[in-house]
Every structure is written in C-alpha cells, then in structure tokens.
C-alpha cells in the first residue's frame, strides 16, 4: 500500500516555451471546459472568456492588488497533469508574470503549492507538468484535485496588474478497458442467446 503526499512543492528553474498551442493527444485531453473559472479581479472585457477563447490576441488583465488568482474548480475530483499558459513579454512587458505558483486542493482553504515557477521575459506557450510524489519516492504524472489555482506572485519589472493570454488544463486520457477483459461476443456460446423466441 502506497501512502501519498500529493502536495509536495517542486521548484523547476527552467521551462522551454513552445510556439504553438498545446493540443490534446493520445496521452492527454483538455479538461478546462469541465470546470468553473473565477478570477481575483479583471478589467472589463478582459476576463475568463478571453483566457479561454483560443485567440492569442486577447488576454486576461487583472485589476487589483497582487497576488492575482485564476481559480479552476471542477465539480468532482479530477486528475490534472499539466497547466499550459500563453505569455507574451514582447507585447505585455511589465504586465507579464515573473513568479507564479500553481496550487491544488479539495477546497479553497486547503490549497497547497505543487509547483513554483520563475520566468524571465517569457514569450510563447509554457507547459507545467504537475506530479504527485509518493512517500516511497515514486511519482504519479498528475495530481488528483477539485481545485487548481494559478497565482501570479510578481510581474516582470515589478508591474502591478498582469496579462495572461491563454490557459489550458490537461488531464491524462483514460485507457480503454483498464485491464478488464470482455468476452468475445462472436463466440457461438454467446451468439446463441442473441435473440429471444
């Protein structure tokens, strides 16, 4: 039996940007549309809709004091394996995040940091993998949680408000049948019961 501590903070100093938006594939699916999104603050016309519209020219702009929060609340416990952010220092300058914290928990009061990130003048898509560390030293490639929170702790050049262009949340794609074996329904022993007389 493995006892797990899912909320051990991981510091990863270097993340490489991608030029194109991450897409669902055989290992992951985008699960952000299964959640309720809230922001700590937002300027009019720069809210959740702009974070999720797949348009690199729109963005969320906060309108308050730091830290700034994006809270993603699922209706049930979900496996979250990656958080992807699109950032653009070239256009947003001091509005661009510099220090970020990704937190997870079953409710807002028990959120724990699972990843701390520092970025220098980021440009492009950044994918942040989330992991659960088991007490035996092994890792699971996801965290099981109801809430994910992206916290902007500090902006580039000490800017006050923040811009984040896009956010995507990915969970692992579940394997079909997961080790269950189903009978072959074309065998004579089963097809003889295919119709009722």
Image (spheres, rainbow, N blue to C red):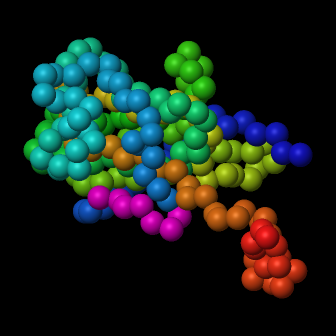
- Left or right: where 126 falls relative to 148: left
Q: Is residue 96 something one can see in this rendering?
A: no
Horizontal and vertical percent position of residue 29? 47, 56
Residue 182 sits in which quadrant?
bottom right
Magenta stretch, overall SS: loop
- Left or right: where 94 falls relative to 26: left
Q: Is residue 86 something one can see in this rendering?
A: yes
Residue 116 in magenta?
Answer: no
Horizontal and vertical percent position of residue 137? 76, 50
Q: Give the residue drawn at x 76%, y 39%.
A: 4
Observer-nearest of 84 and 26: 26
Q: Give the residue drawn at x 69%, y 52%.
A: 139
The relative height of residue 184 versus residue 87 in the rendered view (above or below) is: below
Q: Residue furthest front?
A: 197
Quadrant where the image shows the C terminus: bottom right
The relative height of residue 196 versus residue 170 in the rendered view (above or below) is: below
Residue 72 sits in which quadrant?
top left
Horizontal and vertical percent position of residue 186? 75, 83
Residue 26 in magenta?
Answer: yes
How many discs mark residues in the rendered view? 0
Horizontal and vertical percent position of residue 96? 22, 37
- Left or right: where 130 falls relative to 144: left
The region drawn magenta spans: 21-27
The relative height of residue 194 versus residue 40 in the rendered view (above or below) is: below
- Left or right: where 26 falls relative to 15: right
Observer-nearest of 96 and 193: 193
Observer-nearest of 185 and 136: 185
Q: Give the residue drawn at x 26%, y 14%.
A: 65
Q: Give the residue drawn at x 22%, y 29%.
A: 47
């Amino acid at each position: 039996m493995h006892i797990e501590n899912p909320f051990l903070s991981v510091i990863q100093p270097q993340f490489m940007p991608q030029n194109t938006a991450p897409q669902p594939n055989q290992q992951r699916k985008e699960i952000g549309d299964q959640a309720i999104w809230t922001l700590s603050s937002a300027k009019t016309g720069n809210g959740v809709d702009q974070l999720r519209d797949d348009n690199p020219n729109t963005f969320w702009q906060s309108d308050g004091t730091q830290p700034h929060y994006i809270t993603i609340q699922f209706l049930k416990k979900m496996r979250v394996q990656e958080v992807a952010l699109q950032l653009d220092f070239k256009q947003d300058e001091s509005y661009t995040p510099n220090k970020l914290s990704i937190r997870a928990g079953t409710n807002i009061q028990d959120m724990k940091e699972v990843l701390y990130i520092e970025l220098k003048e980021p440009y492009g898509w950044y994918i942040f993998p989330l992991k659960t560390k088991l007490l035996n030293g092994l890792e699971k490639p996801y965290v099981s949680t109801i809430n994910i929170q992206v916290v902007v702790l500090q902006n580039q050049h000490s800017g006050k408000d923040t811009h984040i262009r896009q956010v995507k949340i990915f969970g692992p794609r579940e394997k079909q049948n997961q080790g269950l074996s189903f009978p072959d329904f074309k065998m004579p022993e089963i097809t003889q019961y295919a119709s009722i007389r």
